[in-house]
Image: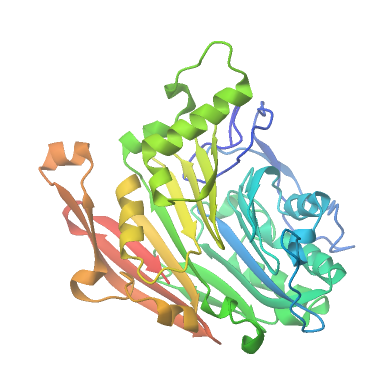
Amino acid sequence: MSGTSLRSHSDDSSNEGEIPEVVTGPFLQEQPQAPPTEDYYHDDDNSSGEIREYTGVFEGPEKTLEVCFRTVDGSTPSPEDGARAGLRRLAREDLDRICARARCTILSSVSNRYLDAYVLSESSLFVYPYMVVLKTCGTTTLLRCIAVLIELGRKLGLEIDWVGYSRKNFNFPGDQAFPHQSFHQELEYLYSHKNLCERLDGSGYTLGPVTSDHWFVFVADQTIRSRSLDLDTDRVLNIMMFDIDEEVANLFYYNNYDKLKGESKEEETKRISHEQTVKSGINALCPGAIFDPRAFEPCGYSMNAILFHSYSTIHITPESGSSYCSFETNQKVTSYKSLISNVIRTFRPKRFVMTLMADEAGLKEVRELPLTSSGAASKIVVPAPRAVAEATGMKQMLYKRSTVASIKVEDDCCSTSVALLPQSRLRMIAAA
């Protein structure tokens, strides 16, 4: 997100997937500072406030919006093989319109029989027949998508079934634009849409200590469980890693890779994107999946991977002193122990935050989860980075949970836990 890059700077996860033109010049972004007074939901939203120049820091942890729909008449259409149903029938112009409201753009996409995954200039978008998951980072205005989603859903004969919005507390809250300058402001903005959709009548929650890393959650649940058997077992794991190992971070600097004679810029970026995926071991985290990776100049990386009904996504900003990496997946596994260990082993962060959001039925399917387990099962052990091993003699890093917090909203479950790596004072926080 600086100079000649669509993503770099501080702890963030900007992303992309195809090869767009390189953007040059200073980083400028519209920053709406107050709600518009007229035509509140107009697409152009001309009341966008002043334009601020990039301040030298970037907000890595993403805002996440998940919206589930159901048919107005209660039917569950089963399209013929190969046909698109529900939200997957939205035109590219409709998806561009959604992203424009959040101040981001689509860069590339991959699809399978079950979903479409889009790499954005500011993270990722996943579209299922009756669910949209949109993740954006930095100073994007994610919640401004709500009115457009409601409108487009109605045109397809769909109504909102469930809405979830969540984010970690901001590192640089003063840089955020309306309506994201505080959680209170975000809740007011969501409540202001009741005139458009009564199903947005939800509640906000805070998980974890307000004096440290914590998690904000808004849930509006109108699900008719008997109609949503597949959604009843949903769960999403999110791991936000800070200060990743320097050797790993260096893999995501574009100029660390050779330039080949006769290779076009598009071919070069695709090759380097693939090399970064393999050299870092990211490809091993999602075996069998369809990958859509993107390397950025001068540094940074984003990736979407889809496998049957599930997605996994990674976003990395590797700058020294403020490196950040996020991993999120909705894979329905019965044990998260090995997945979490593999992700932490790949990036070796000094501190990480984990969240797990699940329906109660989905949580019952989980047999092993370090966030809520006790004793040895609650600990995560990974090999120590070479620099740490040489300096301290430690061969392993032990992450030990120190606190846990959880809430239950209707049939949706969220919990938070904090863990420490005592030897080097490394911290882990988890929200599930």
Residue at figure coordinates x 58%, y 59% from the top left: 63
User: Where does the N terminus fall, quadrant-wise?
Assistant: top right
Q: Position of residue 340 (x, y in %)?
A: 35, 59
Q: Position of residue 357 (x, y in %)?
A: 49, 72
Q: Position of residue 33 (x, y in %)?
A: 72, 55
User: Where does the C terminus fall, quadrant-wise?
Assistant: bottom left
Q: Is residue 213 above or below residue 388?
A: below
Q: How many marks?
A: 0
Residue at figure coordinates x 79%, y 78% from the top left: 197
Q: Is residue 283 above or below residue 98?
A: above
> Which quadrant would residue 354 be assigned to in this image?
bottom left
Q: Position of residue 100 (x, y in %)?
A: 76, 50
Image side of residue 256 versus residue 47, left or right = left
Q: Is residue 120 visible?
A: yes
> Which quadrant would residue 77 be assigned to in this image?
bottom right
Residue furthest out toward the top = 261
Q: Nearer the viewer, residue 209 or 222?
A: 222
Q: Nearer the viewer, residue 358 or 63?
A: 358
Q: Nearer the viewer, residue 228 or 252?
A: 228
Residue at figure coordinates x 36%, y 59% from the top left: 339
Q: Is residue 58 visible?
A: no
